Image: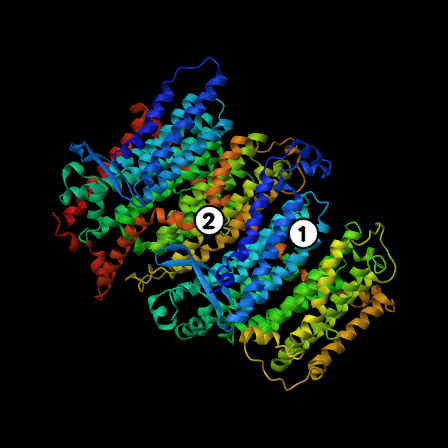
Amino acid sequence: MEFLLPILVGLPFLASGVFALLPTNPNPETEAKNLHWLAGIVSTILLVVASVLAFGQGVGTNLSWVQPWLPKFGLSLAFGQDGLTATLVLLTTLLSLLAGVASITTIGKRLKLYYSLFFLLIGSVLGVFMARDLFLFFLFFELELIPMYLLITIWGGPRRDYAAMKFVLYTLAGSIFLVSSILLLGFVAKASGAPEQSLFLFSQLKQLASNPQFPFQLQLLIFVGFFVAFSVKLPVVPLHTWLPDAHVEAPTPISMLLAGILLKMGAYGLLRFAFEWFPLVGKLLSPYIGLLALINIVYTASIALVQTDMKKLIAYSSVSHMGFILLALAAYNATGITAAIFVMVAHGLVSAALFMGVGTLYGRTHSRDIAIYGGVAQKAPVLFYFFLLMSLSSLGLPLLVSFAGESLTFYSGFISHAFSAIPLSSSVVLPLSIQGVTALSAVGVVLGAAYMLWLVKRLFFGPVSEACQQLKDATRSEVAVLSVLSVLVIGLGFFPNLLTAQFADSTTAIASQFSQAEAQLQRLATPPQSAVALSDGSSTSSTQP
Amino acid sequence: MDWFIQTLWLVPIYPLVAFLLISLGRALPKPLAYDASEGHGHVDASEALPLLAKKEVAFALTSGATVLGLVHAIASVAWLFNQHDGVTPIEQNWQWLQAGDLVLKLGTLLDANTVMMLFVVTFISLFIQIYTHGYMNHDKGYAKFFGYLALFNFSMLGLVLSSNLIQTYMFWELVGVSSYLLIGFWFHKPAAAAASMKAFLVNRVGDFGFLIGILLLLGITFTSGFWQQYLSINPEQALLSFQGFMPMVGGLAKTIPAWLLGAIGILVFTGPMAKSAQVPLHTWLPDAMEGPTPISALIHAATMVAAGVYLIARVFPLMAASMDITMPFITIIGVITAIVGATIAVTQTDIKKALAYSTMSQLGFMVTAMGLGAYTAGLFHLFTHAFFKAMLFLGSGSVIHACEGEQDMRKMGGLMKKLPVTGITYLIGTIAISGLFWTSGFWSKDEILAAAAHQHPVVYILLSATAGLTSFYMFRTFFLTFMGTYRGEAHVHKEDPVMTAPLAVLAVPSLLIGVLLSGFAFGLPAFGHYITHGLMSELPHHPHSLLDAMFNKVGNASQMVGLTGLVLAFAVYGMKLINTDTVKRVLAWPYELFRNKWFFDDVYQGLVEGGFMLIAQMSSTFDKVVIDGVVNGVGCITSGTGGLIRRLQTGRIQTYVTVLGFSVLALVVAYQVLMVKG
């Protein structure tokens, strides 16, 4: 089964090349039809392969495939799968199929190039989720920028150049931190005598990071590097302003992918590297991370409330929801990890559907201004019911998918011991606890309902506005996309255990890292001057070469 | 275990299935003939519809599910009577979601409390559905309406059967959304759209507090120490299960300070405050009258708004544990709500609004009873109120239907002749809610007043005065609507038997259920006895006869007060002895206060627009100007520098590589420095 791993990553790149090299058909309509079909087939194959990988050998099977690549630099081609990866890969391939279907009505020009870039994007995202070599991960992480940049600049809205450039520069700025952390980690690995030819393998690095001899300052540096890099992607306030612009200018299917899976790369990176590998640092910083999450949730939700641009509103709501992921991670327990991954999937489904919804409206009226809409429910009842369902899910209605993630986030914060384990707590003046920030974050529940329902009211209720007189209801392909997402939103909402079982093994693995760190902290906390010993890294690192 | 008990979870599933089938029917493609007719408002072409989309099918599905629920509930109760001691509650749980150590369960809890609510919800639902068949017959959204009704029943029954607080919270939100959908049923009307949103958001504010309360409870009790020491719960039982509340609260009282326990109680109480329309979270309820009248009767009078009171009863140990903080708080809120609701009701001219404020006031009575510790009295009032208030609302709906949508009582009058069944049942309801002549309202209100008289004279006096006011404003609506001469322009239609039959049925419990469950008649035990001792316990010995009970001191006093209200209303609105304009002039200040609903809405609007939205606007500006300004500034500098570098190099990729190169270099240096230091 392992052989499927590189195939799954390679396929989209192959498809990308094929699309780029396809001969031009003289009849543009036939060509478009053929291209859409071909894209659909490729995405379906990807989805099937991902499903075989995820379910083929029973849930929770860990796979890995490693080939030496550039042994001189310590790089290898390593792909792997655990529950977390499998979940996100499934989400990616599914959304790739749906975004492909959504392209039928939204993308009008240069289809060959479009699909070529589209699959380049999908391939690099899959690479990010499946890479098991840190440098390989980094390459995929950076590679994703190129297709994304072009997809926004070629098919985007009026301010596309500004938005695309902003997106790239922001991410590059984050990458500086990422590459620093990766290299630092590489140096340490080398110094600690790791095998030269596979310096960046996850398994090696994880082992290295959990070594109690690892100097604390270095851990802190690396953690912060990872944290900042992925904070740009997630995004975390104040590194978020690229996102509303990118969303507003990107075409609908790309918005769906951007919100649905690209943001999850940030969450994935945070969880996999910063939090799983350096639990000690994160645990100490947990209330501060929680504070960032609180700002993310409440600040962006209140901004969403006053937006007059519907796509911007959904974009800000995305940022707000990403705050829940950060909050759940800051809780540092198994419940929190489950919550974070659950929110990733839930937001992936719901935000894709919401962007599809507003994109559909935009396609009809060519305006994103909420004020011109009104009474759409009378003109487009089918679209209305889908949009309402997704809005209700987004505001956390029980028995729809987002609720489980959101409520688990709150629960995880309140049952967390993250704060009580801090040996420095008595000397830290800030009266900050993860429980406190979690409680305040619950304001997001009210705000989320406010901006979502107000949007629904302004778009769909009331008398039919002038601009919406001729509005057509959802087409067949739009209904298809929204139906698939709705089934998942309701199904996983009713039976959330189906989803949590999918990534339970990752949860357990990461949680065991957390409890090891907790044990370590308790050991340190036992002698009274432990804080000194902890901060004085020189005494522990002296044993290293 | 008996099949009916084992499958109690089916009770909410029946209506859920009905909802799904109706939704499916609506999603089926419709024939062209139907689409063409829809624009003209005719539904004649409905015969061309697929079976599932027919309105008769929608009606049959929803009411069929309700009947099944009712039968299932009765069968379970019958089994309880026969097989079980009737005291020990029966609980079943199923795992819903597991995350780490946290296991959330959904379950059913069957005790006397559940049985009472199950009966109220299914019984009243059923008759309201029959009524709705007449009321909404010509509405285009008939099937959709029944679908939503089924969705509401699912949520409400799930809430009633909940075995734990977390499950309650879930269904609590779901009834909220059903209410949202039904208030906004005619969403093309801006007022309905605004009211539905307001209802949901005000409830969300309450739920915010409720959620924090739940989180605190969870956070404090979710430690192995607490579980081992205080919660000898068997693993079958769920987190925050109602059955474990007593030991849990006992443990809490020992482990956390009293103020925190009180605060948790108040936080949990904010949920009921919003749902049961208690001041200051009451403003959504009158606006919710924008929904179709059957909804006002079912959700906003009989069942959902009473869920708050039901929840207080469920978590009563938590409330009662804080006699100095939570309980007085609840009492004060309840009394204020009773007074505010009643005073506003006096000034209303819209018949539904008057009834809505009356509901709010009555809910205040129930909550006060909870705060006084007389929770069976509160539940008893919930029980009797559900019948007569549903009947009153359905009566008002019958009037509105007959008057072609007119809701202003100033344009009614003399309708008794045209609408005799409606008029008589409305009069019965008015008498019942005023607590007169030993109708059901007398007995339940009497218990609350007796508890107040026993505990707190001030509360007693305030509640008694409010009861007098209740009688006054209710008879005011009656006289304005049904007596005198007709003042409207609309042509008054005849009553529809489909709508009057449910009225007649509901009149029976409105008259009799109080005395039957008063504990003094026919050897039946009192309502409170059912609730506290279960269904099959031995009957207590009564020292008093029925006659004694009918003329007890508190009862006499409240009857006198009620009669005063009746006489005053008759004098003002029946005989016109007193000119209302004179009263308005003399009592100008209070009149303005009451007519403007104590200015709650104005204050809130000011707060939201002037405070909250302003902050949001400022955040948005901050984001745009400051954060993005910095970003753009950095961008400018970078692109300037980039321009410089570009002269040396050749393009962006090189810039990128250069930056990377420099950072690698910096890292090597940093690493060397650190290592050397080490």
- The residue sitting at 48% across, 61% down in the picture is B6
Q: Quadrant of residue A14?
A: top left
- Residue A493: mark in rendering: 2
Secondary structure category for the residue under label 1: loop
Tag 1: amino acid: Gly
The x, y position of residue A9, in whole percent, is 31, 32
Residue B466 shows up from this direction: no
Name the side, left or right, on which A474 lies relative to A297.
right
Crowding at mark 2 (Cα within 10 Å: few <14, some 14-19, many 20+): many
Q: How many marks?
A: 2
Q: Residue at x 62, y 76 (%)?
A: B526
- The three-letter code of the residue at mark 2 reads Gly
B112 over A275 or under it: above or below: below
Q: Position of residue B167 (x, y in %)?
A: 48, 59
The answer to whether any part of residue A12 appears in the image is yes
Label 2: state its secondary structure. helix
Which percent across, then down, holds residue B482?
82, 61
Task: Choose top left, top right, bottom left or bottom right for residue B550.
Answer: bottom right
Which of these two is toward me, A517 or A525? A517
Residue of label 1: B291
